[in-house]
Image (cartoon, grey):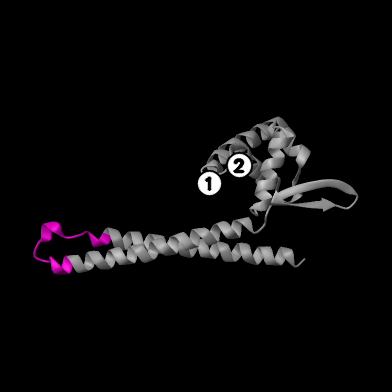
């Protein structure tokens, strides 16, 4: 693969994922900063590199970096003998995001269990009215699906947390 092809692919990814991140209440430039930092990984990106990559003003990049540092999405490190700051995604950001997903799914599980319980009681009370019986199979299948999803997310969290601890202790 050519370097120009890879650069084109990177720009496409920045836009595609940037649009998705905008749906999480991020400004367009902030979303693209996060995507670039995701793609750069542990090597990070300098302030000047972000300005150049996004063709944005220094004040715009600075404002978004300050805001994302304040909210714990982004952090920076320095290299000995180098005065530049290298920005990276906060390693705990993914854990926090997964924790929020688990919390959301747990609430949905509790609510779905209540719905299933209600519909079951309703069916028992109105057992003679077969045309008006709730379809409990769908509710049971949906409940099983969200429980499996929550368990999968929890497994992912455990793996990420374990890897994060292993890398942090090196």
Q: Quadrant of residue 52?
A: top right
The picture places residue 91, in percent across and down from the top left corner, at 67, 57
Q: Is residue 35 visible?
A: yes
* Residue at 60% from the left image edge and 56% from the top image edge: 94
- Is residue 132 on the magenta stretch? yes
Numbered disc 1: secondary structure: loop
Residue 137 vertical placement versus 89 (above, below): below
Residue 111 vertical placement versus 46 (above, below): below
Check the picture and name the quadrant holding the N terminus.
top right
Q: Quadrant of residue 64?
A: top right
* Residue at 67% from the left image edge and 63% from the top image edge: 164
- Judge left or right: residue 121 versus residue 74: left
Q: Return the residue at label 1.
A: 24
- Judge left or right: residue 165 versus residue 27: right
* Residue at 55% from the left image edge and 44% from the top image edge: 21
The picture places residue 31, in percent across and down from the top left corner, at 60, 42
Label 2, residues with CA under 10 Å away: few <14, some 14-19, many ≥20: many
Q: Quadrant of residue 119?
A: bottom left
**Closest to the observer: 65 or 97?**
65
- Judge left or right: residue 152 versus residue 96: left
The picture places residue 34, in percent across and down from the top left corner, at 64, 45
Find residue 31 and name its label: 2
Q: Is residue 149 visible?
A: no
Which range is magenta? 123-137
The picture places residue 140, in percent across and down from the top left corner, at 30, 63
Find residue 153 and name its label: none
* Residue at 35% from the left image edge and 63% from the top image edge: 111
- Sequence-wise, which precedes: disc 1 or disc 2? 1
- Is residue 131 on the magenta stretch? yes
Question: Do labels 1 and 2 touch, CB within 8 Å?
Answer: yes
- Judge left or right: residue 52 versus residue 116: right
């Amino acid at each position: 693969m050519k370097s120009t092809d890879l650069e084109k692919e990177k720009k496409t990814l920045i836009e595609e994922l940037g649009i998705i991140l905008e749906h999480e209440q991020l400004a367009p430039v902030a979303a693209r900063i996060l995507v670039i930092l995701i793609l750069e990984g542990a090597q990070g990106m300098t302030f000047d590199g972000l300005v150049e990559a996004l063709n944005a003003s220094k004040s715009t990049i600075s404002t978004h970096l300050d805001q994302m540092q304040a909210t714990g999405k982004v952090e920076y490190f320095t290299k000995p003998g180098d005065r530049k700051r290298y920005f990276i995604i906060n390693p705990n950001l993914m854990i926090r995001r997964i924790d929020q997903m688990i919390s959301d799914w747990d609430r949905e599980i509790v609510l779905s269990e209540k719905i299933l319980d209600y519909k079951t009681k309703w069916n028992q009370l109105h057992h003679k009215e077969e045309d008006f019986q709730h379809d409990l199979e769908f509710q049971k299948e949906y409940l099983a699906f969200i429980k499996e999803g929550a368990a999968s997310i929890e497994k992912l969290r455990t793996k990420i947390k374990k890897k994060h601890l292993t890398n942090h202790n090196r």
